[in-house]
Amino acid sequence: MSNEGKNTYRNTELKNLVLALIAGMCCDAILSWLTMAEINFSIFPIIALALSVQSLYQEYLKKPVSEDFPLVGLASFFVGVFGHSAFVKAEYPESGSNFIAIVIVLVLMLWIGKKMGYFSRD
């Protein structure tokens, strides 16, 4: 596989991870709106969720998924969920502590970085 082919494959993988992150943030935004009285309704998380899931599905149909992507993609989804949860709890401190959410995000980000090869010695 050429160097250009590897870069294209890596860019597609990064695109899928960002889309999974956006989907996680949107799911938590919708859940926060349903469960917290302080959060006002907005149509934008619903639209962004539909577009990100549709784009992920289109990428899935175009290119095969690597062996590690389902776990890394799920971890990226949970980074979005817990990251948005930590942001909302920082904005509204009466809703609870965000310490656990921040720790989970950091651990998942380190694991994703390890799986993606950012910590390997070349």
Image (cartoon, rainbow, N blue to C red):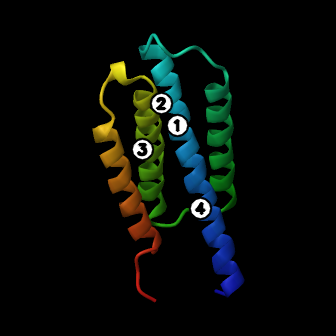
Q: Quadrant of the N terminus?
A: bottom right
Q: Secondary structure at mark 2?
A: helix
Q: Secondary structure at mark 1?
A: helix
Circles 2 and 1, Cβ within 8 Å, touching? The answer is yes
Left or right for 50, reference 67? right
3D distance between C-alphas at marks 2 and 1: 5 Å
Q: Which residue is mark 4?
A: 14
Q: Which residue is mark 3?
A: 78
120 w.r.t. 78: above or below: below
Quadrant of the rendered structure where residue 93 is?
Answer: top left
3D distance between C-alphas at marks 3 and 4: 16 Å
Circles 3 and 1, Cβ within 8 Å, touching? The answer is no
3D distance between C-alphas at marks 1 and 4: 17 Å
Q: Which residue is mark 2?
A: 28
Q: How many marks?
A: 4
Horizontal and vertical percent for residue 103?
31, 47
Horizontal and vertical percent for residue 120?
41, 81
- Looking at the rendered structure, the kind of residue marked 4 is Leu
Image disc number at residue 25 = 1
- Looking at the rendered structure, the kind of residue marked 2 is Asp
Circles 1 and 4, Cβ within 8 Å, touching? The answer is no
Q: Earlier in the sequence, mark 2 or mark 4?
A: 4
